[in-house]
Amino acid sequence: MKTWRAINDYHVIGPVNGPDSEWLVYHPLSMSLFVVDELKGKVLQLKEKGYSIADISLITRCNSRMCERIFEESEEIFQKKTFELKKRSGEKSRKSGPHNIWFFVSTGCNMACSYCYASGGDFKSFPKEIMKKETAQIAVQKLSQLLGDSITTVSFFGGEPLLAFETIKVIVEEFIKNGIMPRFAVSTNGTLLDHKKLDFLLKHNFSVTVSIDGSKDVHDHNRRFTNGTKTFKHVMENVEILKNRGVRLSVQATYTYYAFNAGYTLIDIVDFLSSIASVIAIKKEEQFPLLSGKIDVDNLVSNPKFYNICKDYITYIFDRLSSSEPVFDLAITRAIGEVVNKVHSDFYPCGFKAHLTVFPDGSVYSCHLLTNLHLKLTDNILNLEKNCFYNKYEEIEEWLLEKFRDLNFPLKVWFSDFQDLCPAALISLESDPLLIKKRFGEFINFESLFWDEVLKKIYIMSKKGNWQKILENISHYFGGRKNA
């Protein structure tokens, strides 16, 4: 990923606890959090918003020379912290080329969720099909030849991937035959699991993510079989089998408009799900692909009530992380780990360069959401060449960044280490740039407020005695994933 952060880019957060408390400044390049007094916080915040020194001086009643001195001192600190981070990390670069392989093994699904961003698995443009075993074998052989041991994870999804269980078996066995031993994962709706499949998943140490939206009422409102039958009871029976068999389990949930309007908070949803698994990824309805055309206004991010729900939820997650029964919200946990360990993510505008997706017909894309013809790597995996990972990915990145530039969005979104800017909307809504800009604006404003609250909470909790417990739990979480 290109280096886009400048040494003097920063973000002001504050005041932390009321009008008279300390202010925070976050420096993305060094991933450092600084405490400043109110005057420095206001001066730096106004500069971040683009005010001139003259206007800053007038608003804050701080003379121009003092303002300039604040900027100079801040930049010196940023430079020092950036140098320290580079020295500590040895300026090690991330993996070059894709290392996470996604097999889109089925474009069909046995469910018909009302909010499905994948339109049942075919993304409105692909035929309903299951990857043939021959295609799977060729794909694994080609990827093993091109990427070898740099492949760290292989994930299966759809549609419903377990409709293609026989193909999954072929892929796993073919990787092993080629001497490649990645971590395997599958994301499933949980309805097709049985002991035979579990035997195989356990044998190959799969991690399993099951989609559950909350309690029976919330889940069954949107997640039903294609014939309209409710699925909660069926899924929960299979989840119990997963837990009893010792499968590494996590939950994927969607916070829906129905849940919001029915009075369920994020805490309600995740508190219920935590009885199933400790690792939970929760997204809001309409998030993937970001800014889909179903609605003109995102009724969650534009609602102050939802912001307060999120604030309470952040507090809840930190409280759980400081307990002996932690709950790991995937996004918040990753952010804490990155700030504590000072490791930059693959995000911005998204992490597509770390991934490669093989579709059922053998065509290859970087990401299953970036399916515009311009972004296809090849029609046939047999034609895939190693240079493609560098040349084509650079071309895709330039194309995406140009799209962002056309919308006049700031490329230096401060929270990009924590939250990507899923560019799928630049494709799905390319014909409606005004809607894209409106919805991206909503998203960026909301996410900035959300991550403000997370960083505030990191600072507040770091001053308390239970911070050590949070660090222990975070360390255990990342250690477990690394060794899985």
Image (tube, rainbow, N blue to C red):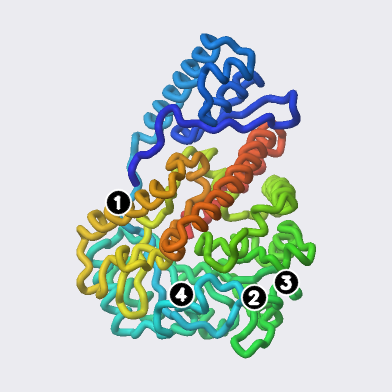
Determine the residue positioned at 22% across, 74% down.
Answer: 382
Instruction: Tell me if mark 2 has few (under 14), some (14-19) or many (20+) residues whose alpha carbon lies within 10 angstroms of its own.
Output: many
Residue behind mark 3? 218
Farthest-out residue, bottom: 227
Instruction: Tell me if mark 3 has few (under 14), some (14-19) or many (20+) residues whose alpha carbon lies within 10 angstroms of its own.
Output: many
Residue 142 position in % (x across, y down): 24, 71
Viewer-nearest of discs 2 and 3: 3
Mark 4 and mark 2 lie on one chain; the one further toward the N terminus is: 4
Q: Amino acid at mark 2?
A: Val
From the viewer's perspective, tell me whether residue 223 is left or right of residue 420.
right
Mark 3 and mark 1 lie on one chain; the one further toward the N terminus is: 1
Q: Are marks 3 and 1 in contact (CB under 8 Å)?
A: no
Q: Amino acid at mark 4?
A: Phe
Determine the residue positioned at 48% across, 52% down.
Answer: 421
CA separation in Å, label 2 and label 3 = 17 Å
Residue behind mark 1? 96
From the viewer's perspective, tell me whether residue 453 is left or right of residue 176.
right
Q: Amino acid at mark 3?
A: Val
Residue behind mark 4? 123
Viewer-nearest of discs 3 and 4: 4
Helix, strand or loop at mark 4 = loop
Mark 2 and mark 3 lie on one chain; the one further toward the N terminus is: 3
- The answer to whether any part of residue 133 appears in the image is yes
Viewer-proximal residue, 264 or 408? Answer: 408
Q: Which mark is residue 239?
A: 2
Q: Quadrant of residue 389?
A: bottom left
Viewer-nearest of discs 4 and 2: 4
CA separation in Å, label 3 and label 1 = 42 Å
Helix, strand or loop at mark 2 = helix
Q: Amino acid at mark 1?
A: Ser
Q: Are marks 3 and 4 in contact (CB under 8 Å)?
A: no
Instruction: Tell me if mark 1 has few (under 14), some (14-19) or many (20+) residues whose alpha carbon lies within 10 angstroms of its own.
Output: few
